[in-house]
Amino acid sequence: MAQQSIESKKEEILRKLKESGASGLTKGGLGIKDAKSLGARALKALEEERDVANLGTPKKTRYVLMAFYKPLELACDQIESNAKEARSSRSGILELLSRKDLEKGSVGEIRKKVDEAIDWLVKERKLLRFRRGRVSYCVHVKHVKDLLVDEEASRIERREMPIPRQVLERSEVLNGYKRVKERLGYSNVEIHEFQKELGAPMGQVKAFLLEENRLGNAVLSLGDWSLSSEEIRSGAIELLGKPHLLVRFREEA
């Protein structure tokens, strides 16, 4: 009769654990409070028969059916979740996670599998591992990819952003012209070379030179178009239907 009662209790425990699924139940959730009770004996028998297992600790139990007893997989899931939740700082520096950071939320049998789970995730290329002295740190591959994508997008954005318009001071322009003239050794300098020296947008430099030419302060010359590179030709100013590649300031002649 007692044996039948244990079997009946075992069926009751199995039914409750089946309903709870992967979440499992504590001893209290199974209605077991006394270590010498019928329920405790039935639960122990089910453990010995490997029908159920405790994913938690002896004090903080979490019993599940053997179909849900997957501590390594659960450890991988918990660690990957922790790694994904980590964010890179606004300065673009990735947050490196220690073992303690990665194991957060893991208890009992799951925590025992943390090291094995980290090794598995590194092998599966979901985590990247770095070493600083004797200490290992990890970062989720997703954050590395996101950082690279963000950096590339930032470079594209910077490349495509129009250069802010700046005021060209005549004194700075003349000083820039003087430096180029002294470096090259002649007064008629390439507009392209002049623009590089100033570091100002080409369109702005051309507009400035056209105005200086109109005022009689600068002389634009044709130069040799046929022998000029595309880079030099980019500085050409159209005047009277012809591309002028050179400029000379009268005050610096």
Image: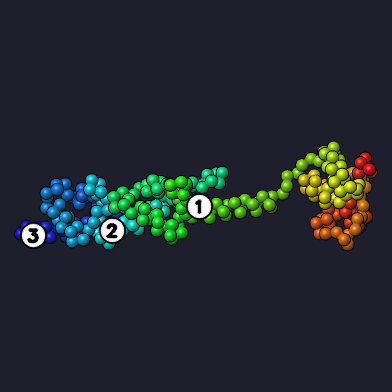
Residue that label 1 marks: 143
N-terminal of the pair, mark 2 or mark 1, is: 2
Residue that label 2 marks: 69
Instruction: Give me the C-alpha separation between circle 2 and circle 1.
Output: 30 Å
The quarter in which the N terminus is drawn is bottom left
> CB atoms at circles 1 and 3 under 8 Å apart?
no
Q: Residue at x 57, y 54 (%)?
A: 149
| Residue 207 is at least partly visible in this image | no
Q: Nearer the viewer, residue 93 or 81?
A: 93
Q: In x, y percent, where is residue 13?
A: 19, 56
Q: Residue at x 29, y 59 (%)?
A: 68
Q: Secondary structure at mark 3?
A: helix
Q: Nearer the viewer, residue 215 or 115?
A: 115
Q: In x, y percent, where is residue 150?
A: 58, 52
Instruction: Give me the C-alpha separation between circle 3 and circle 2.
Output: 27 Å
Q: Secondary structure at mark 2?
A: loop
Of the residues shown, which amino acid type is indicated by label 2? Tyr
Residue that label 3 marks: 3
Of the residues shown, which amino acid type is indicated by label 1? His
Q: Secondary structure at mark 1?
A: helix
Q: In x, y percent, where is residue 2?
A: 6, 57
> CB atoms at circles 3 and 2 under 8 Å apart?
no
